Image: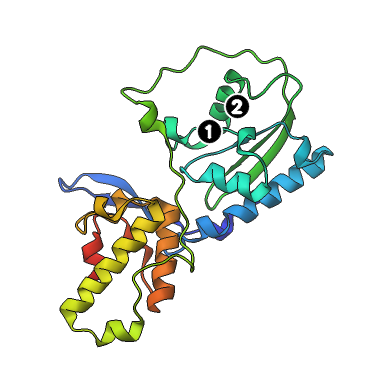
Amino acid sequence: MHTSETCGAYLHELVNDLNGKPQIRTRIGKNASTLAETAVDFVRICCADAVAAAGVTLEQIDFFAFNTPTAWYASVCTRALGIDPERTINLYPLYANIGPVFPIANLYHAAQAGKIRETDLVLVYTKGAAATAVATVMRWGDIALGPDPTPPISVTLEDEEVHQAKIINSSTTISSFSREQLLAAYPEERRRMLESYLLECVSSSIQLPLDKLDREQSFASLLDSLIAILLKNRIEADLQLQISLEQFFGDRKIIGLAV
């Protein structure tokens, strides 16, 4: 299926660096939120159509190989399909985003780990922004594996651990004040209220204690794309205003957004 709904989520521009040399710069576009908004529908529709065409059900699939370009994507797929996370693999902690190579890498590591065996039914799902989403069902054969990839340099088990972020929702307790109280406050007090509110929102979203956060920290050092979208939506709902998603990337600091 096509994924044209996400057209404009990324923009590729030819710009000059500080030395005047041309370079390609990729940045998020105004439609970036569609990457999260459509993720569940794409995987559900594609995988349902693929198993139907193969004459099987999701319950009969022994292993699922999803592309994992972000730390949260494997979790989105397993929850969308209602399957046990043990029936897939998440290579994001090992490689980060390696693009189109993910389906092959996932299959290799899964076979190497004994998660896929001969005669198993395997479903492979991958998608590209503003391109296509594809699901394939295959019967795993007698596959020979090549030598193990070179391990990452200076990476510990702790470095590889991925902590699933807590999604902010309306029941999350954040500093209590109304829009009217905020507007009525003196400018300096209003800034302090906003800083406190933003710090608590970020703390709740990434499950990091408040004492570990600094008002001078940049959002880019704390948030991935999905959490940035969720945080943006929460702030807009709480404060009844509109914020550009670009405010959460680059060098923008928490204190800067409060100002």
Residue at the spot of label 1: 102
Place of residue 108 in the rendered image (x, y in percent of width and height, measured from the top left)? 57, 23
State the image quarter where residue 172 is shown.
Answer: bottom left
Q: Depth check: 134 or 18 in front?
A: 134
Place of residue 182 in the rendered image (x, y in percent of width and height, measured from the top left)? 29, 81
State the image quarter where residue 215 is shown.
Answer: bottom left
Where disc 2 sits, the SS reads helix
Q: Depth check: 103 or 169 in front?
A: 169
Q: Depth check: 176 or 35 in front?
A: 176
In the image, residue 178 above or below residue 65: below
Place of residue 123 in the rendered image (x, y in percent of width and height, measured from the top left)? 69, 35
State the image quarter where residue 111 is shown.
Answer: top right
In the image, residue 204 above or below residue 61: below
Q: In the rendered structure, find residue 14 and report the number of the disc placed on it.
A: none
- Ranked by sequence position, the earlier of labels 2 and 1 is 1
Crowd around label 1: few <14 · some 14–19 · many ≥20 (10 Å): many
At horizontal 40% and vertical 79% (from top left) the residue drawn is 240
Q: Amino acid at mark 2?
A: Leu
Crowd around label 2: few <14 · some 14–19 · many ≥20 (10 Å): many
Q: In the rendered structure, find residue 107 and report the number of the disc placed on it.
A: 2
At horizontal 41% and vertical 67% (from top left) the residue drawn is 173
Q: Amino acid at mark 1?
A: Phe
Q: Depth check: 150 or 160 in front?
A: 160
194 relative position to 70: left or right: left
Question: Alpha-carbon distance for marks 2 and 1?
Answer: 8 Å
